[in-house]
Image (tube, coloured by chain):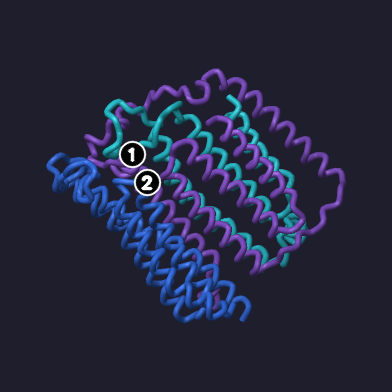
Amino acid sequence: MKGMTVIVKKVTQFMAPVIFIFGIYVVLNGHLSPGGGFAGGVIMASAFILQILANGEILDKLRKEESGLEFLESTAILGFLVVAALGLLLSGSFVFFSNFLKQGVIGELLSAGIIPLENIIVGTEVCAAIATIFIALVVFKDEVTK
Amino acid sequence: MIPFILCFILFLIGIYGIITQKNLIKIIIGLAIMEYSVNLFLILIGYINGGTAPIITHYTSANASFVDPLPQALILTAIVIGLATTALLLALAIRLYRKYGTFDIRKINSLKG
Amino acid sequence: MEIYLIIMLILMICGSLFSLHAKDLLSAVISYGIVGFGLVIAFLILQAPDLAIVQIVVEIITLVIMIAVLNNTTHQQEESRFHFSKMLYFAVVLIFAALFFIAFNKISPLLSSFGNHTTRMATPYMHGATVTGSANLVTGIVFGFRAYDTLGEATVLFTAVIGVLTILRLKGKKDE
C-alpha cells in the first residue's frame, strides 16, 4: 500500500496529534468524567492507526515502532505490578493494591490517590497493545506480497 | 421483559451464525455478535428506572439514585479484551488463508490430509 | 425510554441477520457495524457513558482491522449449494434454540422486570466515592475495589498480543 493523496496526508498531519491529545485528556480525567485508561488508550491507538493508513507502510520504520511498542507494553504491565507492590509496602496495612497516596477532595484533578496513576499505566498498555496488533497485520501483509 | 427477550434472540442469532455458516469471517462475526449480546444483557440487569450515570458532579443531589456501577465496570474491561481476541481470531484466519487459499471451512477440511 | 431501546434492539437484530446472510464479505462486515453502533446507542440509553465511549472506538478499530484483512485476502464467498447436511445444521440450530428457550423460561422469574432492579451486591460500591475518592464510580470500582480483576484483564490483553505476534511471524522459521 502506497498511502493516500497529498490532501489526506496533510489533514492527517493536523488531525493525528489532536486525536492523541484528546486520548491523553480522557486518560487523565478518568476519575472525574466518563472515560479512563481503557477508553483513552484505544483513542490514542487510533491516532497511530490513522497515520499508518494515510502515510502508507514504510517497513523499516514500522518494525522499529513495533519493537518499541512491545517494550512499552511490557513495561506498563510491570509498572502496574510495581504500583500494587508499593501499596503493599508503603501503606502500613499489608494489602495488595492499597491506596498509599492522599485521597484529596472528590472532583479535583489531583485526587483519588493512586487511581490516576493506574489509569495512565493501563492507558499506555492498551494503546501499545492495539497499535502492535495493527502493525503486526500490516507488516505480515507486506512480507507476504513481496 | 421485552428487552431481555430481544437480547436473548440476538444471542441465538450468534449461535445460528456459528453453526450454519461455512465462512471463517462469518463465524468470527457470529462470535462477536454473541459477545455483544452478553455485554448488553449484563447492563440491562443493572438498569434502574430514573437512575443517572454513576458519576458524582456538583449537580448531583444527595439522594440521587445511580444505575448499578458493578456490571459497567466488568463490561468495560471485557469490551477491550473482546477487540484483542477478535484480532487473534482474524490473525488465525489470515494464516489459514495463506496456507489453503480459501476461507471456506469445508475445503480446508478436505485438503487436510 | 424502553421503547427506544426496543427499536434499537430490533435494528441490531436486523443488522446481524443481514450480516450473516450477505453474499459479499465486505457488506457482511459493514452491516456487522450496525450491531456495534446500535450497541453504543443502547449503552447511552441505559446510562452507561463510559461503555459508550469505549464501544464506539473499539467498533471503529474492529471494522478497520476486518476490512484490512479482507483487502489483504478476498471479498468473495464460495456459493453454498443446498444439500442434506444443511438440513442437519438447521435441526441442530433448532434444538439449541429450544434448549435455550427452556432455560430462559426457567430463569426469567428470577429476573426482576426491566428497570426495577434491586442492587443486591453493589450497595457498598454505590457509596464507594468516600472510600476511593474517585468521582467516577465505575473507575473507582475498576481500579479500586476490583484492581485484581483489572490486573487479570491486562494480562489477558498482553497474552492476546503475544499470540497475534506469534501467529503472524514469518521470520525466524528459516533458522531451524
Q: Colour of chain C?
A: purple
Is B107 situated above or below C71? above
Question: Residue C28 location in percent, x, y?
Answer: 69, 54
Q: Colour of chain B?
A: cyan
Q: Is residue B30 left or right of residue C88?
A: left
Q: Residues within 10 Å of mark 2 (few under 14, many from 20)?
A: many
Marker count (numbered) = 2
Question: Residue A10 location in percent, x, y?
Answer: 48, 77
Q: Residue C175, can we see it?
A: no
Choose top left, top right, bottom left or bottom right for residue C93: top right
Identify the residue shown where x is 61% and y is 76%.
A144
Q: Is residue B6 left or right of residue B85?
A: right
Identify the residue shown where x is 52% and y is 59%.
C61
Contact (Cβ within 8 Å) of mark 2 with mark 1: yes
Question: On what subunit does the disc labeled 2 rest?
Answer: A
Identify the residue shown where x is 33% and y is 28%.
B64
Which residue in the structure is indicated by mark 2?
A34
Kind of residue at badge 2: Pro
- Depth check, front residue: C117 or B111: C117
Q: Colour of chain A?
A: blue
Which residue in the structure is indicated by mark 1?
B55
Is B65 situated above or below B80? above
Kindly report the distance in space between the C-alpha atoms of the residues bearing marks 2 and 1.
8 Å
Question: For the residues tagged 2 and 1, is the chain the same?
Answer: no
Identity of the residue furthest to the top in this view: C109
Is B29 situated above or below C88? below
Identity of the residue furthest to the front in this view: B59
Question: Residue A109 location in percent, x, y?
Answer: 23, 50
Q: Residue B75, can we see it?
A: yes
Q: Quadrant of the C terminus of chain B?
A: bottom right
Question: On what subunit does the disc labeled 1 rest?
Answer: B
Question: Residue B17 location in percent, x, y?
Answer: 69, 45
